[in-house]
Image (tube, helix red, strand yellow):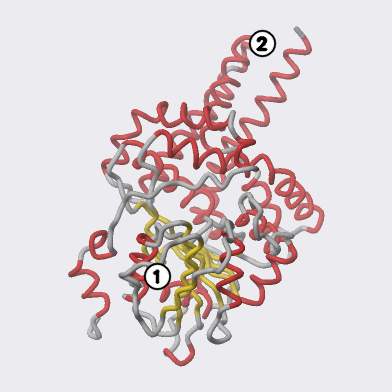
Amino acid sequence: MLILGIITALLTAVVCFYLLMPVLSGFVSVIFPPVFKREMRTELPDPKDQTDFACIITAYKDTEFAFLLADSLFKQRYENYHIYLVADRCEKADDEPVHDKFTLIYPETPLNSKVASIQTAMDSFIRKHEAVVIFDPDNLAHPLCLQELGRMFAAGFKAVQGWRTAKNLDTTYACLDAAGEAYYHVSQRIIPFRLGSSATIAGSGMAVETDLYRRMLQKGGIEDAKGKVIVAEDKTLQVELIAEGYVIAYAPEALIFDEKVASGDQVQRQRTRWINSWFLYIRHAVNLALRGALKGDSNQLIFGVMISTPPLFLLIIGGVFATLMTALFLTSWWWVPAGSLLAFVLFVLICLAVAKSDRRIWKSLIKAPLFMSRQLLALFRIQESNKSFMETTHHQKMKIDDVIGREEVERLLSKEN
């Protein structure tokens, strides 16, 4: 009984720490002014001084969605950029875009890797670009996306993450997926950046200085990726950036519309990769936090602790389990995990409010257990993602005009605006 009590106490301590950490950090970020307040207000320079972006799109087996993304990038209120679309294992299409800012690449041999596609695009640059912006083919870029990323580079940052928000809210699963995105938007991007640390990289919609990006890929051991299944290359990238002392800035005004999963099967496939990546990289997160604590580096410490946080569904399940265990073996302390869980749930709701979430997202919360059950099933399949790419099928064929409205696009691109 004593041993069970000790195990319960240790488990409860760990769970409560991770439940309360975002709550307390959020409170601190509100009562103190943001560290990077001045930089975030830096004005965009003249076109001749704008950061030269290479926008890289990695398509796999299908270019239809990537062409829609390219169309949104053609409608940027920004001048200094070029688009590179790597169409891996794709058939040549009759409706290929023709634009002076667009290069379409069909690899002669299959690459079967997002990283290899990125390398192929970088090897095909028509000029030396100052920074690369990575997009997934199902993304759409807001007309001000590159402008806002450029604003952060003008402020001196070498790595910037834009805000990935929902492109579709057509199913309950899509709404719940968007709810999770809103939570991470606040807890792992807005809050740490306000505190002087770094925002997490989302896998797409991030911009990194070109030479730095090349070096980080090489240092992370994922540069020679052809033919291999690389699990969460974005996590490797962010750890390497922070370890070298860089700050990953957050530009919430740089909107990237991302397709959310529409079915339970899609949840399982996507979350299998994500959960596996957390288990694979948690030791790197802990090492980064310890290194930051020993060096007195708040960026490394805060970021390391933050990315060691378990996935949202595991954290909630852990809170429930810790409450039950404490009620059984440490009866007088049951209120500690219960109170921590309640505070965390309220914090999640606050995150949704801060993100100005659509009412459909709020209505979907009652079915959150359905979403979590699919993630539990994914937990038992994580080894599959080490052997298979487990790509997610896309369905939402939308233009940027469909998402924000044609009149809004025209207004943003007008010279008078």
Along the line of sight, the residue nearer the viewer: 205 or 291: 205
Looking at this view, name the residue that lies furthest to the bottom: 48
The picture places residue 187, in percent across and down from the top left corner, at 51, 48
* Quadrant into which the N terminus falls: top right
Image point (67%, 28%), residue name: 13
For residue 145, the mark is 1
Mark 2 sits on what residue?
Answer: 329
Looking at this view, name the residue that lies furthest to the right: 294
Q: 280 left or right of 130?
A: right
Looking at this view, name the residue that lies furthest to the top: 1
**Placement of 275 over or under 134, stated as above or below:** above
Count the labels in the image.
2
Identity of the amino acid at label 1? Answer: Cys
Q: 116 left or right of 141?
A: right
Quarter residue 157 falls in: bottom right
Q: Secondary structure at mark 1?
A: helix
**Placement of 287 over or under 215, stated as above or below:** above
Identity of the amino acid at label 2? Answer: Phe
Label 2, residues with CA under 10 Å away: few <14, some 14-19, many ≥20: some
The picture places residue 36, in percent across and down from the top left corner, at 54, 68
